């Protein structure tokens, strides 16, 4: 069929719609599901239609939204808000046909003026276009013409004669098998195939399926979604291609400008711009490339400082623990030193049994009925107690490590004084975290990534072992109250007191003039 | 175990709300399509909860009032699965500070339905009469629940399961469920089971009760056999004759329909009350 013939048919349909409006039967669409939500500051309606498409209109926080796009504003309690809530009040009690009819028949109340009336008209239009399905079957080959509103075509033709010229240009060469939508949106679902051409006048086209022929859009927007295909060409007259994720076998022509759009070039330009934007963003966040070595240095220094701050914080906690429970920390530390294997085993077993004990304790308290209030306290208190035990145990082990460092001849350890428990503990904390700090230093240097990771792993293992031993020592000593594993033999007590090895007393006297290394006090 | 957590939720719910709840009202409905069978799961934490059947051509209709600052409604329907209820926005214990909340659910009569109801600290009034239930799982926490099967189910089911936490729980017309087996797992509370309704086959009822009082209300024409495995539980076995380890109704041998109750109770009391049909 030629363009002029089709235009004549369309025109005839429009005129017939005006002259004999009752010949076109307006039908409302089937509403599959509805959701009416009314709250203090929001009131919304969501409809789902047969075919899966949806309409959502919401009054939310001062904005009137139609399918997520703002079409106006309101103030809670104003005339527009009250009108909308009244409509929702009707919608609550209705379903399907009566609901669709009630919503489609709704019109803008005369008392609304200005912006409120504009927003209400947008709602009315959205409801009309979503709910009305006026199908006029014209005997034009196998095609069909669908009018969103019976008078829309005539209005279109009278108001915008320029569109007619564009329509004529766009329709040149269109075949007989054509589907025409006027003043309404066309949706081609993913599983749908239009065997001929698709023409949308004064509406938007959203295509997810396949069009075997051409697509013509006059005065609207075209969306080609992923998976869609157009076997022929796409012609846009006073229209816009807002998304192109499908495949167009033919040409993409803007009829108005008479230019052919190069889709590939368009996509390339878009991609190029996106890549540039990403690069700009990356450069902005990272700064110039020549600063990268300094960034590495700064990062490592920051990490080391972080560790030092952590040691400082733990030291402060340790000071508090020593001040309030110094004797118990002594017992725990002695147990950890005297029985490290047993402490580690107990610590590991305790760690494994923590969660079962927590759960069983909770259930046991619940079952006892009277223990229910205790059970509520038990839930947070047990994990907190376990964490405190692990922390105190770690501090005790750190104190032992500090003593070992004080006794050692290692460089930079002379400042650690065994006479001061706090300094000893801080020294031990630094010693236990030294592997992490070295790893941060190593990370500054190039090509030493493996060594860096090795140091981190070793540091983690050392920390875990220290925590296990400390936690086990806390359990063995019942929080520092039992000294079963912290007792010295008489020789050890003597050695500890004198800080000398008496192992060879029976065999040989100490050499004349032998000196006893002394960096502070010993164990009492 | 779940019932204990729900019981805990009740304790938490007793904490007064810091601020007045801002209630939001939501109405949801969906047309009935050509569903062969629908799986329906309903979750509701606290408030008032009602379920009833309907004949309006809808699969379901739900009216919900909830605190919009804390909860959001859920209504998912896909692949013949419907999930409705409310979910906490910020996580935490469901049901806390839900004073004034309400959920009214209507379900399509006659549609084959696999129904899973889960509610916490609620006052529930559930009428399952006429629903074509193919499976029923009902889990309630600390609630005052009345479950009624007011009309016989057009479908049959293998198992109906009730999990009751700390609750006052009443189930009526259990015979109308047309279930081969009914299991009741009760924690703490008062349990009243009406074994009336239209029994279309012999059935077994398993009751596992922790601490509480159980009252079995049995229509006079029904044959009842009670097998009890209990500890510190009293039994008022009026109208039952002890035969070996079981208690049987006088009409057991001749009854048209027979129901066997297996009772496992820890502490509490069991009472059998005979009612005229």
Image (cartoon, coloured by chain):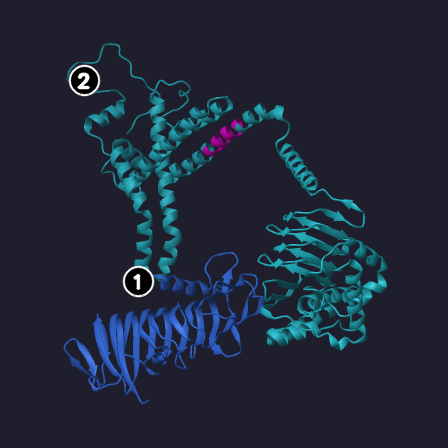
Image coordinates of residue A377 in percent, x first then y, are 38, 56
A125 or A360: nearer the viewer = A125
> Quadrant of residue A197 in the image?
bottom right
Q: Is disc 2 in contact with disc 1, using a CB cutoff of under 8 Å?
A: no
Q: Chain of mark 2?
A: A
Q: Which mark is residue A367?
A: 1
Kindly tell me whether residue B39 is visible in this rendering: yes
Query: Chain letter for cyan?
Result: A
A390 or B178: nearer the viewer = B178
> Which residue occupies the extreme bottom position in the image?
B276
Q: Residue A302 colored magenta?
A: yes
Q: Residues within 10 Å of mark 1 (few under 14, many from 20)?
A: some
Q: Which residues are magenta?
A: A300-310
Q: Which residue is painted at 62% across and 26% down in the image?
A: A289
Q: Quadrant of the C terminus of chain B?
A: bottom left
Q: Which mark is residue A504?
A: 2
Q: Which residue is painted at 25% across and 70% down in the image?
A: B264
State the CA–CA distance, disc 2 to disc 1. 61 Å
Position of residue A285 in the picture relative to residue A335 (left or right)? right
Image coordinates of residue B227 in percent, x first then y, are 21, 75
Q: Which mark is residue A403?
A: none
Vertical position of residue B200 compared to residue A156: above or below: below
Image coordinates of residue A131 in percent, x first then y, are 67, 69
Vertical position of residue A63 compared to residue B178: above or below: above
Q: Residues within 10 Å of mark 2 (few under 14, many from 20)?
A: few
* Mark 1, secondary structure of its residue: helix
Colour of chain B as rendered: blue
* Mark 2, secondary structure of its residue: loop
> Quadrant of residue A429 in the image?
top left
């Amino acid at each position: 069929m030629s363009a002029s013939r089709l235009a004549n048919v369309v025109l005839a349909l429009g005129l017939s719609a005006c002259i004999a409006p009752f010949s076109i039967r307006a039908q409302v669409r089937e509403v599959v599901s509805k959701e009416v939500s009314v709250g203090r500051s929001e009131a919304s309606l969501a409809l789902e239609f047969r075919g899966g498409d949806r309409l959502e209109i919401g009054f939310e926080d001062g904005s009137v939204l139609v399918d997520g796009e703002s079409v106006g504003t309101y103030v809670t309690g104003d005339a527009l808000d009250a009108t909308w809530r009244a409509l929702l009040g009707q919608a609550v009690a209705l379903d399907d046909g009566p609901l669709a009819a009630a919503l489609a028949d709704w019109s803008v109340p005369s008392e609304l003026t200005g912006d409120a009336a504009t927003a209400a008209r947008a709602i009315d239009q959205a409801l009309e276009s979503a709910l009305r399905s006026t199908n006029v079957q014209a005997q034009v080959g196998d095609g069909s013409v669908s009018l969103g509103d019976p008078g829309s075509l005539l209005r279109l033709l009278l108001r915008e004669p320029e569109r007619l010229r564009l329509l004529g240009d766009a329709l040149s060469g269109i075949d007989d098998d054509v589907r025409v939508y006027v003043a309404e949106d066309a949706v081609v679902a993913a599983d749908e195939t239009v065997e001929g051409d698709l023409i949308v006048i004064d509406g938007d086209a959203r295509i997810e399926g396949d069009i075997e022929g051409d697509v013509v859009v006059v005065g609207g927007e075209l969306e080609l979604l992923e998976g869609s295909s157009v076997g022929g060409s796409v012609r846009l007259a006073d229209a816009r291609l807002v998304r192109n994720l499908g495949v167009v076998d033919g040409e993409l022509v803007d009829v108005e400008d008479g230019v052919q759009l190069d889709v590939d070039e368009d996509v390339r330009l878009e991609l190029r711009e996106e890549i540039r934007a990403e690069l700009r963003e990356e450069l902005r966040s990272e700064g110039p490339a020549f600063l990268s070595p300094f960034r590495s240095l700064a990062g490592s220094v920051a990490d080391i400082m972080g560790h030092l701050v952590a040691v400082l914080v733990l030291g402060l906690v340790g000071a508090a623990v020593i001040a309030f429970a110094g004797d118990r920390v002594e017992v725990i530390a002695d147990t950890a030193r005297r029985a490290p294997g047993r402490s580690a085993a107990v610590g590991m077993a305790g760690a494994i049994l923590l969660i079962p004990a927590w759960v069983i304790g909770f259930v046991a308290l619940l079952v006892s009925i009277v223990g229910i209030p205790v059970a509520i306290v038990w839930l947070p208190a047990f994990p907190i107690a376990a964490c405190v035990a692990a922390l105190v145990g770690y501090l005790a082990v750190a104190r032992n490590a500090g003593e070992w460092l004080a006794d050692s001849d290692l460089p930079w350890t002379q400042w650690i004084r065994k006479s001061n428990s706090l300094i000893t503990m801080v020294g031990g904390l630094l010693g236990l975290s030294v592997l992490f700090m070295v790893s941060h230093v190593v990370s500054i240097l190039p090509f030493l990534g493996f060594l860096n990771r090795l140091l981190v792993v070793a540091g983690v293992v050392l920390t875990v072992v220290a925590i296990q031993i400390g936690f086990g020592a806390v359990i063995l000593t019942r929080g520092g109250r039992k000294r079963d594993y912290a007792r010295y033999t008489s020789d050890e007590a003597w050695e500890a007191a004198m800080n000398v090895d008496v192992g060879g007393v029976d065999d040989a006297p100490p050499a004349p003039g032998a000196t006893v290394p002394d960096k502070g006090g010993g164990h009492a | 175990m779940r019932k204990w957590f729900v019981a805990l939720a009740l304790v938490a719910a007793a904490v007064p709300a810091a601020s007045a709840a801002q209630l939001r009202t939501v109405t949801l409905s969906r047309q009935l399509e050509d569903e062969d069978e629908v799986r329906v799961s309903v979750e509701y934490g606290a408030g008032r909860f009602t379920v009833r059947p309907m004949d309006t051509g809808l699969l379901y209709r739900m009216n919900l009032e909830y605190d919009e600052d804390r909860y959001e409604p859920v209504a998912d329907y896909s692949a013949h699965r419907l999930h409705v209820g409310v979910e906490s926005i910020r996580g935490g214990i469901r049901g806390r500070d839900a004073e004034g909340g309400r959920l009214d659910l209507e379900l399509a009569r006659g549609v084959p339905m696999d129904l899973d109801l889960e509610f916490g600290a609620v006052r529930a009034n559930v009428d399952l009469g006429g629903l074509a239930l193919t499976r029923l799982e009902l889990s309630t926490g600390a609630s005052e629940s009345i479950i009624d099967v007011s009309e016989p189910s057009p479908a049959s089911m293998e198992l109906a399961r009730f999990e009751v936490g700390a609750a006052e729980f009443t189930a009526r017309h259990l015979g109308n469920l047309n279930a081969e087996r009914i299991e009741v797992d009760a924690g703490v509370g008062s349990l009243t089971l009406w074994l009336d309704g239209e029994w279309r086959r012999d059935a077994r009822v398993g009751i596992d009760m922790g601490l509480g009082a159980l009252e079995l209300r049995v229509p006079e024409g029904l044959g009842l056999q009670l097998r009890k495995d209990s500890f510190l539980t009293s039994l008022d076995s009026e109208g039952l004759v002890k035969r070996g380890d079981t208690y049987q109704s006088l009409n057991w041998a001749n009854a048209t329909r027979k129901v066997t109750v297996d009772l496992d109770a820890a502490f509490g009391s069991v009472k059998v009350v005979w009612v005229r049909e």
